[in-house]
Each structure stands twice: as C-alpha cells, then as structure tokens.
Amino acid sequence: MKASPADQNELLRLQAADTRLSQLDHTVRNLPQAAQLAALQPEVDALRARWIAATGEVEDARAELKRVESDVEVVEARKRRDSERLQHTSSVKDVQALEAELTSLAKRQGDLEEIELTVMERLEGLEAALSAIEAERTGLESRVQELEAARDGEAGTVGAQRDALARDRATIAGALPADLVALYERQRSRYGVGAALLLRGVSLGSNVKLTESDLAEIRRAPDDDVVLCPDSGAILIRNEESGL
C-alpha cells in the first residue's frame, strides 16, 4: 500500500487519540467510587434484611396488641351488659350466675391487661430497635448517595473529555485516505496497536529494537510505502528520528 509520509505521520495522532480513548474508558470502568459502592453493597443488603425482619416483628407485635385490645373491649362490653342485667333482675339464681360471670370476666380482663402490658413493652423495645436500624440505614443510604453522586460527576467529566476527543479523532481519520485508515483499524483490532513510531531503530509498537536485516529492508522501502512492524504488526512510521 502507498500513502504519503504526511498521511502516515498523522496515524500517530490517530493512535494517540485511540490510546487516550482506551485510557478514559478504563477510567470510567474503574472509578474508585464504583469500587467503594461495590464494597458497601453487602452491608446495604444485610441492613435491608435486618430492617425487613425488624419491620415484620413490629407489625406482628402491633397486630398482637390489637387483638388483645379487641379482646379487652369484648370483656368490658360483656361486663357492662352483665352489670346492667344484674341491676334489673330479681332472680336469686340469675344474680348468682351473673356475679359468677362478672368475677370470671374480671379475672379474664386482668389476665388480658397483663398480656396487653407485656405486648406493649415488647412492642416498645421492637420499635426502638427498628428506629435504630432505620437511623443506621439512613446514614448508609446517605453515604451511598454521596458516592453515587461523586461517581456520576466524575463519569460525566470523563465522558465530556471522551466526547471531545472522539470528535477530534473522527476529524483526523476523516482527513486520511480510507484504505490507510482501514489498514490501521485492522492492525489495531488484531494486535492492539495500529501505528507506531520507529525511534532510533526501536519499534514503539513492540518496544523492541529491530534486527539489522529488518532495518535494511525498511531502508530500501520508498517513503510512501506503508511498512508494517515485523514484531507488533503496527504500521511503522518513519521520520528523522527513526535512525535509518
């Protein structure tokens, strides 16, 4: 393939842009905040599980308290009914039965109120534990939000740099012959480097000094020949620094 030395030299700018684009992509994939968020995730998951369990315990205790309160209300209603019936009956037998039932209801109410107090005390402890977990969760969520904001901000900054560089890269590539760019892209996709400077006999594509036979062959090639590095496969750019 033939290409002017000026066009070949422009490939170094294209390669520099591609190298920088790869670096920016690597930066976005490896932002420190992303690693910190990943490290926090097990703690977030564990805290959420604790919150779910504590919430369930509180809801169960509240439901139990509601049932006991309902039972107390039923007993109180029966006591009021029996007391009214007691006041309006003249039957000795009915009086004895009602008094016995009132005694039983009073004991039942006492038992229920003791249970109610126990459940209320347990509920108070569970609610305090849930409040502590919620406070811990709020603090952790705040930390996560701070890290996410910092990550997104840094990713946005890097993204803006990448967009600007991608536009510059497109401009460089657009000014070069299509077949030369196609060769560059093919070699870069195969070997990771599309173009490299030959610097004082060393290919910067492989960072290896070329053999004398390779250098002799390159010296014989016309300036507009597109030469490939025998080690890296990159297009070898020759200039006054090449040591030929």
Image (tube, rainbow, N blue to C red):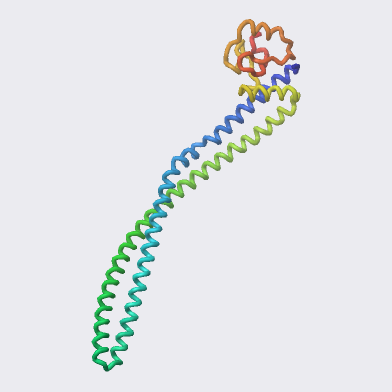
Q: Residue placed at 44% from the left, 40% from the top?
A: 39
In the displayed structure image, the side of residue 16 where residue 4 appears, left or right: right
State the image coordinates of residue 112 (x, y, percent, origin top left): 29, 71
Q: Quadrant of the N terminus?
A: top right
Q: Measured from the top left, where is residue 69 in percent x and y?
A: 35, 72
Say above or below: 42 vs 79. above
Give the farthest residue toward the bottom: 90
Q: Residue 233's quadrant in the figure?
A: top right
Quarter placement of the C terminus: top right
Residue drawn at (27%, 94%) of the image: 90
What residue occupies the far front of the structure in this picture? 93
Residue 219 is situated, as x and y percent measured from the top left of the image, at: 69, 8
Up-down: is 240 above or below 188? above
The x, y position of residue 222, in whole percent, is: 74, 10
- Please name whichever residue, 69 or 132, is drawn nearer the observer in this view of the structure: 69
Q: As displayed, is residue 238 above or below residue 170?
A: above
- Compared to residue 49, the image places residue 177 above or below, namely above
Query: So how many labels did they put on this image?
Result: 0
Q: Residue at x 71, y 24 (%)?
A: 182
For the point 31% across and 85% down, the residue is 82
Q: Nearer the viewer, residue 21 or 43?
A: 43
Kindly indicate the quadrant of the structure image that contains residue 3.
top right
The answer to whether residue 189 is left or right of residue 62 is: right
